[in-house]
Structures are given as structure tokens and as C-alpha cells.
Amino acid sequence: MGFIRAFNIVMVVLFVLAASVQLNDPDPLVWISLYLSAAVFCVAHAFQKLPSYWAAAFALVAFL
């Protein structure tokens, strides 16, 4: 397993944990959908189903 794939899998776990913590937030749907979307992008990138620039574009949009 390559470093990038392992990193993506670790990030999936962290994003899912972050989404689960947001359940008691005043606006949980926004944050849960953001974290779970990031997790989906990490899974897709880990298994090479998505080009890297899509994840970068998502990160840019999420940052704004």
C-alpha cells in the first residue's frame, strides 16, 4: 500500500469521526455533509477513481 493511499484512508477515518462529532452542533447538516463529502473524495482518490484536481477543486470550494 502506497503512502498516498494510506494517508487517504487515515483521512477518511478522521473525516467520519469529525462528522459524527457534529451531531450536537446548531447547524449539523452543513458540517456533516462537508466532512462526509471530503471522506468520499478521499476514498475515490485512494482507489484512483477520481483525478486529483477534483479533490483540490472541492477543497477550494469548501474553503470559500
Image (cartoon, rainbow, N blue to C red):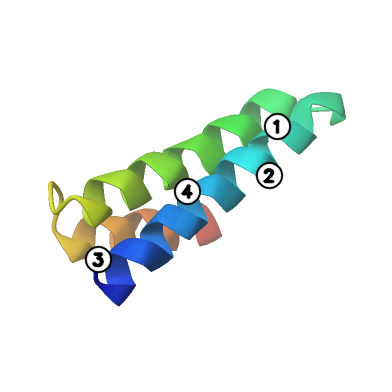
What number of labels is visible? Answer: 4
Q: Nearer the viewer, residue 20 or 59?
A: 20
Going by the numbered disc 1, the residue's amino acid type is Ser
Residue 5 place in picture, x, y as percent: 29, 63
Front residue (pair 7, 32):
7
Q: Quick one: quadrant of the N terminus? A: bottom left
What element does badge 4 sit on?
helix
Q: Residue at x 19, y 50 (%)?
A: 47
Q: Which mark is residue 20?
A: 1
x, y (%) of residue 60? 41, 63
Residue holding disc 3: 1
Is the residue under label 4 in contact with that under label 2 (CB below 8 Å)? no
Q: Residues within 10 Å of mark 1 (few under 14, many from 20)?
A: some
Question: Residue 53: percent from the left, percent from the top?
Answer: 20, 64
Q: Marks 4/3: CA distance?
A: 16 Å
**In the image, what residue type sits under mark 2?**
Ala
Q: Is residue 57 above or below residue 43?
A: below
At numbered mark 2, what does the secondary structure look like: helix, strand or loop?
helix
Residue picked out by circle 4: 12
Q: CA distance from mark 4 to mark 1?
A: 12 Å
User: CB of mark 1 within 8 Å of CB of mark 2?
Assistant: yes
